Every structure is written in structure tokens, then in C-alpha cells.
């Protein structure tokens, strides 16, 4: 089969399309014929050898998110060849024509969800759900600010929050991004490149009850210090740091005076029980149409280096996927 392989850590150029042996499923394993593979920012950190949660053993095939059909199964597996599935991590990497998964990593994909959309389910939607509900414990009627709401995680968070009855504020950096965020359910949108947008959010949230109850932060090294002046006081405000690309200086008094909380998250810390909750929420939303992954671009598998460049650019409007 064809697969992207990384033999040394480095820039996008280390992603090489190679021919490797087809994996074979053992007991409790599923072999998936990949129709689309999702590209996530954390893939780039692992490729560069700088992932905080640990780097892979080389040579390595990137990717945890894919969608396709069951090719073969090992003993003790209740899936059948031909069934549509999405993956929530894999054993051998998703940037490939075939991906080997544990049984629990291959999840049912509804017929109305395309393979490209299915490749944008696990990391974006699981991250959004964990941040909103398992860490921030967001409640109906609260206000949530989603920074970078036009990206994969941002769109997932907007859709989840709107369905749960929160008042949703989203930011993006382009007119097209703002329109996308509004279309996917945000009540209010702001261009984070516009001077004065922070004050506009502050005025809006202040008028609605004294600050933003929950902030989901995708770029903490740029925004965290500002978030701490936007979050609600009275001991109820929470900021969940989902992404950061460097250090940041903050004023602890902004946290102290509001008695707010700053929470960090890494998706891979979920327990088995938490993962079961996430799967139930995601799959119900996919089935009833509440959750609608947005695909920004589909690129051939050989263009994985270009996909890694694009996923780190500003102005995201949904997921980038690779097509084997």
C-alpha cells in the first residue's frame, strides 16, 4: 500500500509517500480502507519532533483521524467488511491507503456523512466536547467565546455549544471565516484582526451578565492575557486552553480579582469512561445532523507536505483532508 512515512523529524518536506507492506488485522483489530484522512495541527508538532505529549518512534505514519470502509477484521470483532467507519486514533497511522485500528478505534459512520467529513470527526469534535462539557462544565444559558471559531475545533465547538443552549460568540480573521462561523450557529461574530474587537466583546458580554462564562482558546500565546480580562467574574469564569504556539505573559491579578479558572487540556488524557461519553455525544449529533463537519480542502495523499503547511496558516475555514 501507499503511505506517508516520516524517517526523521523536521519540516513538511520529511513527509514522504512510500510503498509499505499492507497491515494485517490480529485478534480484536480492524483494517480500514481509508477514503479520507484528516490533518490536525498536532500532526505537525509530532512530525517536527516537538510534541509535548511525546514524539513517535520513527519511521512513523502520521494521522489519527480517517474515514473509510472495513477491509478485514481479526477474530472477536463484530464489524463486517464493507461497513462505513471513522477512526478515533489508529495503530498504524491514517495517512495511508490502509489503517489498522483496535476495535474501539473504528466507529460507525452514518450514510449521510461523507468520508471527507468523517475524517474531521474525532480530534476536532472530541476536543470541543471535552473542553466545553468535561472541563468547563458549560451550561445552557451561559455565554461562550470561541477564539478561532472557523477552524476544525472551533466549528465543532460552535455547533456543540449552540445545540446545548449557550449564547455563542465566535472570532475569525476573514470575512469568509466570519460568515462560516455565523452559518454554523454563532449568535455573534467578530474579526480578531479588527482594532477594538476585544472591547466590543467586552461590551456585549458585560451587558449580558458581566463577562464571558467560558472561553475556548486555540492560540493562548496570543490571546490568553486578553481572555483573562474578558472572562466573567464572581468565581464562575473559565478559560480552557486548547492550543498554544509559545509562551505568554499574563497578569495573575486578572485571575485573582475574578476568581476565574484557567484550564489546560490534551485530548489524549481522556479516560475510557470519558471517551465513551464523547463518542455517545458525537455520534448522536452526527446521526441527527446537529454536528456537521466542514471540509475546507481535499488534497491527494502525496500532497501531505502542502497540507501540513496549510493547516498552520491563519484563516482556516474547516478541515483539510488527504485523499489516498
Image: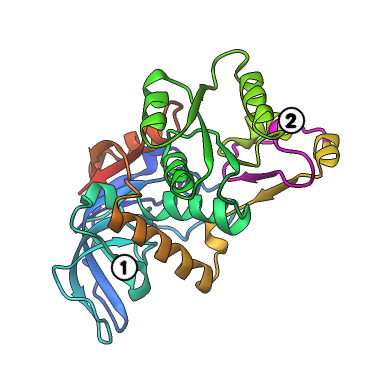
Instruction: Give the percent coordinates (x, y) of residue 42.
Output: 48, 47
Residue at 47% in and 61% down: 57
Element type at marker 1?
strand
Q: Which mark is residue 229?
A: 2
In the image, residue 21 above or below residue 13: below
Q: Nearer the viewer, residue 97 or 106?
A: 106
The span shown in magenta is 230-251
The colour scheme applied to this rendered structure is rainbow
Q: Which residue is the site of mark 1? A: 106
Magenta span contains residue 205: no
Mark toward the viewer: 1 or 2: 2
Where is residue 271 shown, x and y percent of the image? 55, 70
Q: Work out whether residue 285 or residue 244 is closer to the camera in this orientation and state it.
A: 285
Residue 200 in sight in this render: yes
Task: Kindly tell me whether residue 54 is visible in this rendering.
Answer: no
Which sits earlier in the primary sequence, circle 1 or circle 2? 1
Name of the residue lying farthest toward the top: 195
Looking at the image, the residue that sits furthest to the bottom is 76
Residue 30 found in image quarter: bottom left
Q: Is residue 22 above or below residue 42?
A: below
Between 182 and 172, the residue placed more toward the observer is 182
Q: Position of residue 324 (x, y in %)?
A: 20, 49
Alpha carbons under labels 1 and 2: distance apart: 42 Å
Crowding near the residue tagged with mark 1, few <14, some 14–19, many ≥20 C-alpha atoms within 10 Å: many
Amino acid at each position: 500500500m501507499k503511505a506517508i512515512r516520516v524517517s526523521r523529524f523536521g519540516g513538511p518536506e520529511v513527509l514522504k509517500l512510500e510503498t509499505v507492506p499492507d497491515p494485517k488485522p490480529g485478534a480484536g483489530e480492524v483494517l480500514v480502507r481509508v477514503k479520507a484522512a484528516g490533518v490536525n495541527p498536532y500532526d505537525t508538532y509530532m512530525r517536527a519532533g516537538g510534541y509535548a505529549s511525546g514524539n513517535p518512534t520513527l519511521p512513523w505514519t502520521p494521522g489519527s483521524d480517517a474515514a473509510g470502509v472495513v477491509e478485514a477484521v481479526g477474530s472477536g470483532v463484530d464489524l463486517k467488511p464493507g461497513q462505513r467507519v471513522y477512526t478515533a486514533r489508529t495503530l498504524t497511522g491514517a495517512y495511508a491507503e490502509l489503517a489498522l485500528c483496535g476495535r474501539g478505534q473504528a466507529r460507525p459512520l452514518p450514510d449521510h456523512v461523507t468520508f471527507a467529513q468523517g475524517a474531521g470527526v474525532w480530534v476536532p469534535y472530541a476536543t470541543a466536547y471535552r473542553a466545553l462539557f468535561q472541563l468547563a462544565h458549560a451550561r445552557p444559558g451561559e455565554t461562550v467565546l470561541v477564539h478561532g471559531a472557523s477552524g476544525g475545533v472551533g466549528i465543532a465547538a460552535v455547533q456543540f455549544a449552540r445545540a446545548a443552549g449557550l449564547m455563542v460568540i465566535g472570532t475569525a480573521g476573514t470575512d469568509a471565516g466570519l460568515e462560516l462561523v455565523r452559518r454554523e450557529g454563532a449568535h455573534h461574530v467578530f474579526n480578531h484582526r479588527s482594532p477594538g474587537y476585544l472591547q466590543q466583546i467586552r461590551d456585549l458580554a458585560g451587558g449580558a451578565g458581566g463577562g464571558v462564562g467560558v472561553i475556548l482558546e486555540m492560540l493562548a500565546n496570543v490571546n490568553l492575557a486578553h481572555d483573562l480580562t474578558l472572562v466573567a467574574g464572581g468565581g464562575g469564569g473559565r478559560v480552557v486552553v486548547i492550543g498554544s504556539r509559545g509562551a505568554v505573559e499574563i497578569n495573575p491579578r486578572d485571575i485573582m480579582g475574578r476568581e476565574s479558572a484557567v484550564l489546560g487540556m490534551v485530548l489524549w488524557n481522556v479516560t475510557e469512561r470519558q471517551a465513551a461519553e464523547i463518542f455517545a455525544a458525537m455520534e448522536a449529533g452526527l446521526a441527527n445532523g446537529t454536528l456537521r463537519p466542514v471540509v475546507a480542502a481535499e488534497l491527494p495523499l502525496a500532497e501531505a507536505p502542502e497540507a501540513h503547511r496549510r493547516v498552520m496558516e491563519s484563516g482556516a475555514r474547516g478541515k483539510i483532508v488527504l485523499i489516498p
